Amino acid sequence: MLHGRLSRVLAVVVGVSLFVVAGCSRTAPKTEEPAKAPEAQQPVAPKPDVIMRIALNADPPKLDPHQSTALVDRQVFQSLFDKLVDFDTKLNIVPGLAEKWDISTDGKSYTFYLRKGVKFHDGTPFNAEAVKYNFDRMVDPALASPRKSEISAVEKVTVVDESTVKIDLKQPFAGLLATLADRAGMMVSPTAAKAAGLDFVNNPVGTGPFKFKERIKGDSITLVRNEEYWQQGLPKAAGVVYKTVIDENVKLVNLQSGQLDIIDTVPPAQVPQLKSDNRLKVLIGPSLQYQGLWINTTKPALSDKRVRQAISYAIDRPALVQVVFGEIAIPARSPFYPGTPASDGKPIPARDVAKAKALLAEAGQSNLTISLKTAPSPINQQIAQVVQSMLGEAGIKVNIEQEEFGQLLDKLNKKNYDIAQVGWSGRPDPDGNIYAFMITNGGNNYAGYSNPQVDKLLNDARLPTDMAKRKEIYSQIMTILDDEMPYVYLWHPQDVKGVGPTVQGYVAVPDGMMRTLNLTK
Amino acid sequence: MRSGGGCGEVSNRVLAFLTRRVALMIPILLLVSIIAFSLIHLIPGDPALVILGPEAPRETVEALRKQLGLDRPLVVQYAAWLGSALQGDLGRSLVDRQPVRKLIGQRLPATLELAALTFLLAITIAVPIGIYTSVRRGGVADWIGSVAALAGQSIPHFWLGIMLIMLFSLQWKLLPASGYVPIWVNWKANLLSLILPAFATGAREAAVTTRYLRASLLEVLKQDYVRTAKAKGLAEWVVILRHAVRNALIPVITASGLQIAALLGGLVITETIFTIPGFGRLIVDAIFQRDIPVVQGAVLFAAFMVMTVNLVIDIIYSAVDPRIKLSGGRG
């Protein structure tokens, strides 16, 4: 009798124990108003033992700027590494490890005068030799560095004297300084890099305000103050802990409970409520990002530009932004965020369903059915549904296919899709937002788009050092792209950060990076 | 009454049993590793591309693919992995080059501790309630207990987790919302940080265990020897505690064993909500990142743990029920 009962029990146990992992819907919790009144916060002198806790939406894979490909790495780099030059809040280039620089009149030669007396975290000196080593490392085939293509214009790096270094280019490259304000300009310690080789990713050594202490994969990265930092009296905090928190709602809860000081995303639905919570600060500002739809021009129906134009005309960009994002996004018509140098300031195209239908009829595609591929998050699903509904009104039937990001990338690369909702995180220099995407066989050219005229213009735009001239060229490119529509630009996500009540010294910069130098509580 | 001969004979049997079980683990682990390897390679998506992300230039992706040996035939890749694994080297993470063994070692303690606490919590709730409601079956207490158990089993534990955080961390500020601290660093902070997650998952485990115990106990209470004991004049509570419960625990122990094994992987969602750097999340993250060595090493290790737990359960089982011999026969 025990047998029978046992097997029955076991059968039920097995059935019950089948747990379902994954696909848990993110129930947006209703945040209740705190029962206590907010405490008055007085700015006080920085305490010596302040630790800043910052949330990241993914675990940074590689803490080596020369091997890094994920964007989230860059956040941690702001604390660990100084760059040759940096950005101010208006994205102007300002001195970093280079105090000043000269550019030759032909734009092919840059001479950097480096700061003296700066040391790496391991005590070794920062100097021109170190800069040369960094550049050599980026082009070293053994490292297969993603930075190599970023500095492909560099021909030669010469050590002039201990604190002067000269960089010669193959041809003028106006975006060089902006590139050197990001990972390609982050200086690593030659001694540490030589000793660690590829393992530098786990033992980063730079000149930055904070030094690496330890990390727990998937959980946190702990940094401590660099006591010998070259800026007097800085950094203010005693340490920074970057915590990996993937779920937006969990992040928010932790900010509200005081366990996190700064979070890098806020769920759109929670923004109005947060703004009314006067203990927290929600910072919404300009960014460099854009989002929209890739159109696979290699597919027969989509190779006709009238069909692609129809897709663009069918979408009401302001309505999409209003419904899904509220105030944390703005409508887009180009890869350049309004107000940035290359942005031409043209108005957002209005929705025109009649025109869309006419174009489709002309192209003989009045009953088109296409698939829309997108990432699996709830926000992506919402966007896809809005797009589906808008395109439906123009006579295009859209089937939504949500794919895990790895698979999505794969399909994009293999041109195995119709339209796909994928955007770009954005770069300060306009070239970084358009070149690899629109040039023939570009690494990010998922549309399979090829136009020799555009290719020439993209290359031309890299040459002048005068931004006004470059802006003209980008305007010409956008005029062509507006007609050929390989990518439908839909919205620019804003830079959104949630900041705790006691945090001081946080300044938002449109590149989305959280700079920790002046942070304290 | 214990069956079998003298001490020597018993320990010989135990030894034979253990040897057989351990020997059986090896082909099973091999099979598990082949399945894990095949599955992760069946998922579409080039690992090099996924690891480097959309921001990486094409040459870097190609170079990484070669560097990781992803262009070799699958059989060769598996054989290479197996060769190292047999020497104790589970390889390095493709994403950040940390040794897989180190990663497992870093992430296992949190999950083990959480699983243990969840289980303990479940037992602490389930045993008294299970016993009480079975004895007082049909009464109000039983009815309340049944409804509570049903609720506990039905409420999704991730929702419960978030609700608990909002209540205990946000509203009442009694417990931290996140922030696991290892027990050897600060045991007080460690326990505080694990109370809510243990409860979120433990509520369901408690509900399930309560119902098993109750059902099992009800069966046992109908047995002849129980009626005999009562007829002999023993108080009902004594009868229950000394005789019935012990026998009723047998199926519960088996169920618990399976529950613990399930917990080791099933705590992924709890780990995500409470941001605990646990073992379950390690595997899930590695799958999404196509971090093949981590997936293989961790899945293998998980299989090993589950088999060990089952072995331990079987040994306890035989110790608790003298009718069951380790060799699998019945006395």
Image: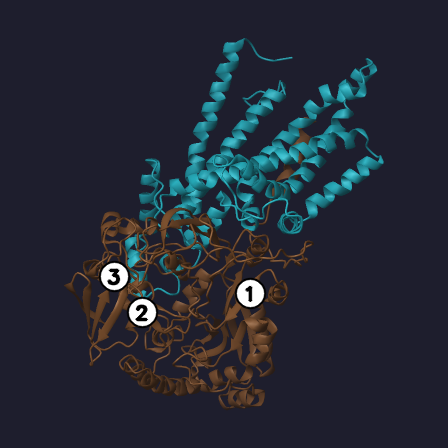
Chain colours: A brown, B cyan
Helix, strand or loop at label 1? It is strand
Q: Given the image, on which type of amino acid does mark 1 rest?
A: Val
Helix, strand or loop at label 3? It is helix
**Residue located 42% across and 55% down the image:** A236
Q: Position of residue A235 (x, y in %)?
A: 39, 55
**Residue located 56% across and 27% down the image:** B314
Q: Is residue A8 left or right of residue A309?
A: right
Q: Is residue A112 left or right of residue A201?
A: left
Dot 3: chain letter: A
Q: Position of residue B203 (x, y in %)?
A: 66, 41
Where's the N terminus of chain B, which quadrant?
A: top right
Dot 2: chain letter: A
Report which residue position mark 3 lands on.
A138
Earlier along the polypeptide chain: callout 1 or callout 2? 2
Report which residue position mark 2 lands on.
A179
Dot 1: chain letter: A
Where's the C terminus of chain B, which quadrant?
A: top right
Whether residue B97 is visible, yes or no, is yes
Report the mark closest to the observer, 1 or 2.
1
Report the mark closest to the observer, 1 or 3.
1
Please rate how many residues cluster around mark 1, counting C-alpha atoms within 10 Å: few if below 14, some from 14 to 19, many from 20. many
Report which residue position mark 1 lands on.
A282
Helix, strand or loop at label 2? It is helix
Question: Compared to B202, does B10 lie above or below?
Answer: above
Q: Given the image, on which type of amino acid does mark 3 rest?
A: Met
Q: Badges 2 and 3: C-beta atoms under 8 Å apart?
A: no
